[in-house]
Image: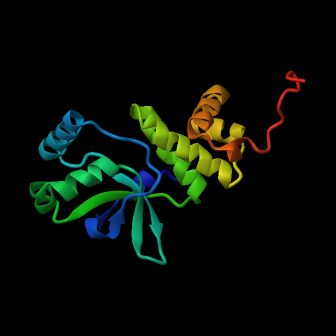
Amino acid sequence: MKSPVYNVIAVPVEKIRANEYNPNSVAPPEMKLLYDSIKEDGYTMPIVCYYKEDEDMYEIVDGFHRYRIILEHKDIYDRENGMIPVSVIDKPIDERMASTIRHNRARGSHDVDLMSNIVGELHGIGRSDSWIAKHLGMDLDEILRLKQITGLAALFKDKEFSRSWE
């Protein structure tokens, strides 16, 4: 495998969009710091995207907040000529979701409710708790807690329960 970062491309910001599953959020002071960093240092890291050939669009896997900076700050947009550095990965949706979570968890915290939704979506497409644990860097207790937050019985439908209540 060759790391995608060796093939960074400049993509017009209009051809990029957010994904619908990223549970990461950044507080206003950190967004200001990110803006200051990009203003002073430029984009030092590309955003990571998946290219949707049928739509000719790039969907963000990691780097949503760096993307927001160019959208929300005309000075950055103008300086970058409306382009943003992109590293492209080619993975199916479940692996892209896992990539997003790995990137987020390596940096900090993210929204618990949205994280619960991702666990639910991965479960819904047939991923086991052990797959989720391995690919999202969680232990089984954390996955159980996230499933409990959603309150969705469907997340437990294929589980055997103790007969201790009998």
The C terminus lies in quadrant: top right
Residue at point 20%, 56% (across, down): 70
Residue 10, can we see it?
yes
Residue 1, can we see it?
no
Residue at point 17%, 39% (across, down): 32
Residue at point 44%, 33% (across, down): 106
Q: Residue furthest left?
A: 75
Q: Position of residue 30 (x, y in %)?
A: 23, 35
Judging depth in this view, the residue of 84 and 150 nearest the camera is: 150
Q: In the picture provided, is 107 more to the left or to the right than 91?
A: left
Q: Residue furthest bottom?
A: 54
Q: Is residue 22 above or below residue 129?
A: below
Q: Position of residue 59 (x, y in %)?
A: 42, 62
Q: Position of residue 143 (x, y in %)?
A: 62, 33
Q: In the picture provided, is 40 more to the left or to the right than 24?
A: left
Residue at point 45%, 41% (across, down): 103
The number of numbered badges drawn on the structure is 0
Q: Is residue 56 above or below residue 158?
A: below
Q: Position of residue 164 (x, y in %)?
A: 87, 21
Q: In the picture provided, is 19 more to the left or to the right than 129?
A: left
Q: Residue furthest front?
A: 166
Judging depth in this view, the residue of 101 and 166 nearest the camera is: 166
Judging depth in this view, the residue of 22 and 157 nearest the camera is: 157
What colour-coding does the image apply?
A: rainbow
